[in-house]
Image (cartoon, grey):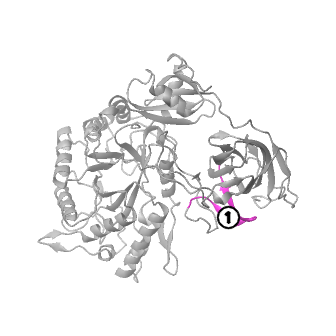
């Protein structure tokens, strides 16, 4: 008897619309991304309110991640200052978000151990080894990168490269991050050199870097990125790209940092962008756009003269603004919002432009090509049996891409740094420790979750036992099956003694009602912090624990949740600008989508959002007319 109830009047609860704007970035549903960077090494809580693409300002740069120990062995920290891993996870957390890795090779902000003045023992061969290890480490950590700045600032501009491969350079807008005490490096030599033929640099080292990147990321968009390309070194940049393409470098995009656009007229900007595209034959990305202007109206006018061309030109694949909080950007007066939340005129204009012109965006570059989704799979090849024991470290292998309903094929979400000491599944970001009965999942913060493909033998009531540990009284978790809760939030008892004691395990228990067949079981942390070793499902209500803990621990009994059956749920519906369209009742998200597609409420094509009024979860669908 599944049926969908009527859409409520648009007049219902219209005031809710403003509260939902945070769920839709300015360019959501558009032809290309509009992104920004981390702020003071953090991802601000309003990042997703405005932007659907993120670049770490510093955290993914070579020198931020790669170090060596006293023996010269490479070490990699992706969760350090301006955490690169957190930027990657931010993009993975919601449908429609994008992440750009910045950058693999750059003459600035490179590891000190590559500097000849700081490490006299460095050689060409050792530099080549370190470069290879660096590429391999990034590929192991982020095998599915979407956009990569492969080489940054390597244009030869008269007597030097654009960054300190050999000696310090002036830098974009005269702001250099090169280390004058470095003494030069062997990066260029290690990657094949830079022979000059008939007076023209061949940039072999750049070509080699792109070949190395393509080998490791066959599906990524590979970018060459540089500054002053719309002004002083436009000709040199064009010649460089032409030479690299002629020599076979697998470059997908030419990234225009666009720090040099202050005061540039609309016609001048458009003609320069067009010339670069026409003469290189490559699509462009506007990769680091900003306008350093104290006068609000002058800054706004530059935005208004330049952004529409970027958005409405089909061979521009995306736009990244280089910082949005004034006083927390790399150069003075480039921010478009103040720290107190006040929006400068450029930000007000930007919001109005995208609210009214989103559908004008054009993109034939392939920058937004979606990956064919692949589902998550059981870690051990087969679904875990219920009744039976589930070791928490055996969560599913993540899939790839996003499904039609906007959900991802991720099998876990862990926002913490990787603190684990176990080598088990070290390719994941989940914090696994060697303790308790073998390996446990630890350092679980609120919102972290893990998923497991399970096979329930028969429909009925089961008793769930979980082996858990906590040091405080704030820890809790819940279980869900196929998106529906099968337990309430279950409190985890604190250790009886000792501060920061996560070694005293207790059992918590709940009766759960399950249906026969294969399902996705999710463990979600609802209160930090806790460790969990395993979960056991035993047939029958109030069953006996087959593995009681005999260290004086306690068993906490939780309340039973109703059987996992379809429940009529209310959904609030919003358009891509966050305007409230009405409320519907349906037995599933899919039913709600079907009704909307066949109704006259969705009057135009685009992205529409659904908020489950029971869980608060937001999902979206794209409607094409």
As drawn, 399 above or below 427: above
Graded by Cα atoms within 10 Å as few (under 14), some (14 to 19) or many (20 or more), the crowding at tag 1 reads many
Residue 481 percent coordinates (x, y): 66, 43
Q: Nearer the viewer, residue 279 or 217?
A: 217
Report the residue marked by disc 1.
Answer: 433
Say what secondary structure mark 1 lies in. Answer: strand
Residue 294 percent coordinates (x, y): 33, 40
Which quadrant would residue 247 be assigned to in this image? bottom left
Q: Nearer the viewer, residue 86 or 180?
A: 86
Quarter occupied by the N terminus: top right
Query: In the image, what residue occupies the spot 72% across and 56% down?
Result: 532
Residue 600 percent coordinates (x, y): 43, 20
Using residue 218 as the reference point, say whether residue 436 is left or right of it: right
Q: How many marks?
A: 1
Which quadrant would residue 173 be assigned to in this image? bottom left
Using residue 17 as the reference point, say whether residue 273 is left or right of it: left
- The dominant secondary structure in magenta is strand
Residue 27 percent coordinates (x, y): 39, 38
Which quadrant would residue 28 be assigned to in this image? top left
| Residue that lies at the very extreme toward the left in this rendered image | 198
Query: In the image, what residue occupies the spot 21% across and 42% down?
Result: 264
Q: Answer yes or no: is residue 81 visible.
A: yes
Q: Nearer the viewer, residue 118 or 64?
A: 64
Quarter occupied by the C terminus: top left
What segment carries the magenta color? 428-445
């Amino acid at each position: 008897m599944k049926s969908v109830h009527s859409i409520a009047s648009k007049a219902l609860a219209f005031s809710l619309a403003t509260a939902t704007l945070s769920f839709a970035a300015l360019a959501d549903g558009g032809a290309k991304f509009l992104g920004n960077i981390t702020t003071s090494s953090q991802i601000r809580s309003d990042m997703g309110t405005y932007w659907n693409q993120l670049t770490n300002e510093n955290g993914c740069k070579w020198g931020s991640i790669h170090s060596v120990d006293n023996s010269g062995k490479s070490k990699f920290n992706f969760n350090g200052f301006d955490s690169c891993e957190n930027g990657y996870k931010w993009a993975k957390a919601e449908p429609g978000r994008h992440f750009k890795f910045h950058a693999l090779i750059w003459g600035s902000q490179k590891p000190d151990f590559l500097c000849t003045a700081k490490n006299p023992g460095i050689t060409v061969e050792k530099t080549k080894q370190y470069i290879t290890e660096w590429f391999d480490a990034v590929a192991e950590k982020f095998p599915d990168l979407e956009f990569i700045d492969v080489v940054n600032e390597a244009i030869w501009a008269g007597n030097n490269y654009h960054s300190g491969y050999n000696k310090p350079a002036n830098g974009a807008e005269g702001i250099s991050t090169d280390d004058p005490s470095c003494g030069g490096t062997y990066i260029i030599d290690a990657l094949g050199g830079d022979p000059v033929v008939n007076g023209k640099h061949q940039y072999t080292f750049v070509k080699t870097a792109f070949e190395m990147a393509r080998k490791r990321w066959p599906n990524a968009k590979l970018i060459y990125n540089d500054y002053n390309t719309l002004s002083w070194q436009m000709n040199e940049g064009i010649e460089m790209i032409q030479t690299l393409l002629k020599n076979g470098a697998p470059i997908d995009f030419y990234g225009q940092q666009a720090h040099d656009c202050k005061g540039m007229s609309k016609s001048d900007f458009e003609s320069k962008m067009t010339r670069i595209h026409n003469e290189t034959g490559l699509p462009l990305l506007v990769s680091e756009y900003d306008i350093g202007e104290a006068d609000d109206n002058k800054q706004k006018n530059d935005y208004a003269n330049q952004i529409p061309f970027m958005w409405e030109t089909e061979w521009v694949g995306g736009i990244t603004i280089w910082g949005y909080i004034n006083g927390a950007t790399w150069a003075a007066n480039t921010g478009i919002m103040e720290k107190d939340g006040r929006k400068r005129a450029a930000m007000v204009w930007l919001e109005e432009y995208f609210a009214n012109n989103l559908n004008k965006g054009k993109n034939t570059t392939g920058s937004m090509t979606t990956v064919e989704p692949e589902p998550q799979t059981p870690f051990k090849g087969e679904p875990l049996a219920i009744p039976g024991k589930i070791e928490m470290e055996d969560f599913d292998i993540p899939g790839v891409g996003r499904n039609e309903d906007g959900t991802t094929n991720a099998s876990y979400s862990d926002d913490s740094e990787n603190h684990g000491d176990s080598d088990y599944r070290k390719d994941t970001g989940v914090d696994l420790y060697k303790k308790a009965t073998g390996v446990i999942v630890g350092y679980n913060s609120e919102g972290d979750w893990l998923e497991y493909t399970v096979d329930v033998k028969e429909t009925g009531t089961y008793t769930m036992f979980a082996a858990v540990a906590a040091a405080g009284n704030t820890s809790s978790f819940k279980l869900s099956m196929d998106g529906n809760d099968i337990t309430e939030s279950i409190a985890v008892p604190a250790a009886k003694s000792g501060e920061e004691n996560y070694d005293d395990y207790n059992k918590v228990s709940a009766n759960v009602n399950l249906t026969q067949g294969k399902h996705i079981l999710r463990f979600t942390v609802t209160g930090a912090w806790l460790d969990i070793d395993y979960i056991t499902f035993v047939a029958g209500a109030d069953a006996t624990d087959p593995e009681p803990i005999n260290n004086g621990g306690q068993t906490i009994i939780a309340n039973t949740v109703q059987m996992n059956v379809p429940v009529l749920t209310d959904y609030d519906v919003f358009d891509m600008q966050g305007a409230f369209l009405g409320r519907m009742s349906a037995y599933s998200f899919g039913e709600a989508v079907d009704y909307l597609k066949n109704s006259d409420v969705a009057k135009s094509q685009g992205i529409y959002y659904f908020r489950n009024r029971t869980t608060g979860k937001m999902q979206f669908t794209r409607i094409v007319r």
